[in-house]
Image: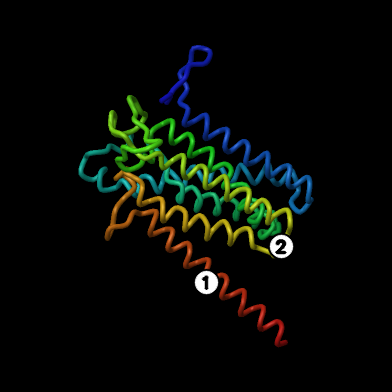
Amino acid sequence: MLPYFEIFGRVVPMYGVCFVIGMGLAVLTAWLLARRFKEVPQIDVTCSAVYTGIGAVVGAKLLFIIVNLPLIIDGSLTILQAFQGGFVFYGGLIGGVIGLFIYVKHYKLNAFKFFELYATIVPLGHSIGRVGCFFGGCCYGIEYDGPLSVTYDMTIGNTPVGIPLFPVQLVEAALLLCLFFAVLFLYIKKRHLGIQVLTYGFAYCLLRFSLEFLRGDKERGDLLGMSTSQFISLAFAAVLVAIIIIRVKKAKKQISE
């Protein structure tokens, strides 16, 4: 593995490089889509990305600390180590949504258009970020001594060294890339208002809930045999179902009137 590489005398982690590349490509894609369809001003894509990015980083770090509270309380993990440690995607997603909502509300913009655009590009950035997780060794898979297994000889985090593992990070990266192309197709075709958000939401909840069974990192939390992310996946799916029910009732009411 190559968790670090050297450039101009500085040691740079591949995790951080993939994170930056993922965010950069996602924003660039959003910018190009905004220029092509003119539903969201390009300047607002750039500015809203700052709000969204800040919210995502804060949310991802906060959820990481919350998930690891038992370790912090028993002294296995210090506060400093927690702040220097990793991130939790769902925390980043929630924080990013809050940051984006703050931006669109402050400038009185069409929130639906922005959420449709971001639902389209998030899987792309997330996919590349998961490749970074693979290089860094975080979010690692269960013990697996079969085809395509990976064995780390050094890592950034607490990944088992010298033990064959399932490459769950790369599997998630590949599935997220497929999801990106699917949602991008829906965005380009403009099927129905909000279909991109619902498609991304349901697909990722299902994907993440399933892949958690192949994860081996215990730091992500465990309750009643399920991880923190699995509970959040179920909660997100329930919210999306509620949104669909509300929209259907509203549409029926408008038709009857």
Image quarter hosting the C terminus = bottom right
Give the x, y percent position of residue 172.
47, 45
**Label 2 belongs to which residue?**
191
Judge the density around disc 2: few (<14), some (14-19), many (≥20) Cα neighbours within 10 Å. few
Q: Please, is residue 232 above or below residue 150 in the view?
A: below
Name the residue at the front extreme.
147
Residue plotted at (36% across, 54% down): 228
Residue in the image at 76% along x and 54% along y: 39
Q: What is the three-letter code of the residue carrying label 2?
A: Arg
Query: Where does residue 144 sit, x and y in percent of width and height?
Result: 31, 40
Horizontal relation, residue 167 to residue 43: left or right = left
**Callout 1 crowding tier (Cα within 10 Å): few <14, some 14–19, many ≥20:** few
What type is the residue that disc 1 sits on? Ala
For residue 177, which quarter of the picture? top right
Where 74 sits versus 12, above or below? Answer: below
Rendering quarter of residue 143: top left
Q: Earlier in the sequence, mark 1 or mark 2?
A: 2
**Which of these two is toward me, 119 or 68?**
119
Residue annotated with mark 1: 242
Work out whether 34 lies above or below 203: above
| Quarter containing the N terminus | top left
Q: Secondary structure at mark 1?
A: helix
Task: Tell me if 119 is positioned left or right of 15 in this view.
Answer: right
Give how far across and how far down residue 198 sits, in percent. 58, 62
